[in-house]
Amino acid sequence: MGQASSVAAKKKDYGDLESSFTEYFKNIKTENTIIPQDTIDAIELHLRKGDTHGTSSEIRAALKNIDESTINIAVIGESGAGKSSFINALRGVRSEDKSAAEVGVIETTMKITAYNHPKIKTLTLWDLPGIGTIKFPPKTYLKEVKFQKYDFFIIVSATRFTKHELELAKAIRFMKKNYYFVRTKIDIDLENEKKTKPRTFDREKILEKIRSYYMNNFIQNNMDIQQIFLVSNQYLSLYDFPVLMDTLIKDLPAQKRHSFMLSMSNVTEAAIDRKHKSMQQTVWLEAIKDGILATVPAVGILMGDVEKMKVKLNYYRFVFGVDDESLEFIAKDFQVPVEQLKKIMKSPYLLETKEGKTLEENLLNYLEKCVSANGGLLATGFYLRKTFYLQLLFLDTVTEDAKVLLREIYSKASSNSPHPQLLTMDKFYSFLISFTGFTVICFVLFYLGLWEWNKG
């Protein structure tokens, strides 16, 4: 009788877990999931059967696939197109960093150069020579650059796309790979337009004019292209860079999305949220794999768990760019003490002991807050190990720190940028036009005798 009731309880628990797992992944947009749908279906099937070993094995294989899946991105463009700056932007490095792609080189790239991402070791960007050079003629270009190794191609230009590049795009599509056209230096184009035509300057009309020019060019070359991405390598949050990132994530295979999302620079809060959602999925999968229905024990947190928590927190801070080294770089850029940046954050102090408590006591205190305050993932009808609750708390805290830091950076950058001056100039021109109009009207009225100076 006791054994039968135990089996029944176990089946109910697995039923709760299965429904919770299904509900969780159902609420994640398809383009954001980091494991394929067939893997999700397989995990649900094992849970439905109450198969602990099968569930853990399936999740372990999925996580291994995510960790080991490589991403190779080919970037093509002629000298002066802003290709090196674009590669640096994708890698989140500055032009003066040692590992940066060299910017401002006059000579056309004559060799294939690989640039590894500084944080995501499985992601590599490849700087490919422009098509049509002596060493890389159009007929043999794809063969020479080892076409098959790349997940997709980004074709970069700062002026117009050449006939060779358009033909290359057709060949890439024929070989069933994706390509993306990126027009760089949009900020420079807009600034030039503003200087030469200050009275009639219209940002949106100019951007639309640039898009139309390229779309017509593609149509004339019998190309059916959905979108061209207008970007600034200097101001990544503006124009189409975030849209490009969303498009690349959507088009990547599910198992490669996690690494790519973690590689993204924190240019917008939406990008930070994407990282958070992707990392949350790995915590969720690990929790099911390692602690299926492990109720929260009455005993404290083991020292081994504390050490694991330190590693996890440091990893989150590293990926989200709020680790000590990243903060030092930012502080140096904006000439502020690094402690000033840390004061607006919480994650650097999560593992500090305070108020006479031990680190374990602090973690248990955090745990109580997490369990009582966190809905969504935790409101699933079953319990996870304490360490997974804490991982979620650490992840949420680091995510919020990244957003706070982003706001602080934008605040300081805008106060130091020339754009407020440009706004002042716009106001001056508006005033000048209004004043000129008023003067002309007064002169006409005076000339016609309808108005006199000092009348009455």
Image: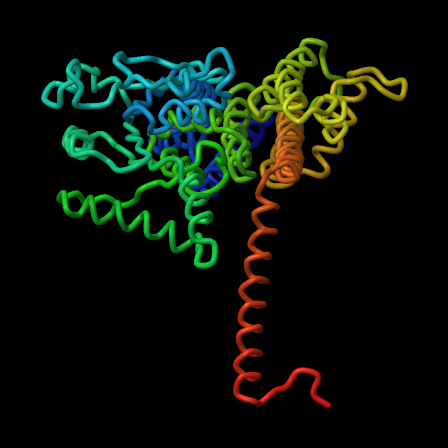
Rendering colour mode: rainbow
- Say above or below: 420 vs 445: above
* 35 or 325: nearer the viewer: 325
Residue at image coords 13%, 23%:
138
Residue 322 occupies quadrant: top right
Quadrant of the rendering where the C terminus is positioned? bottom right
- Say above or below: 65 vs 14: above
* 66 or 99: nearer the viewer: 99
Residue at image coords 30%, 44%:
227
Counting from the top left corner in percent of width and height, residue 283 is at 55, 25
Counting from the top left corner in percent of width and height, residue 33 is at 42, 34
Counting from the top left corner in percent of width and height, residue 273 is at 54, 36
Residue lying furthest left: 139
Left or right relative to 323: residue 336: right
* 393 or 272: nearer the viewer: 272
Residue at image coords 90%, 18%:
356
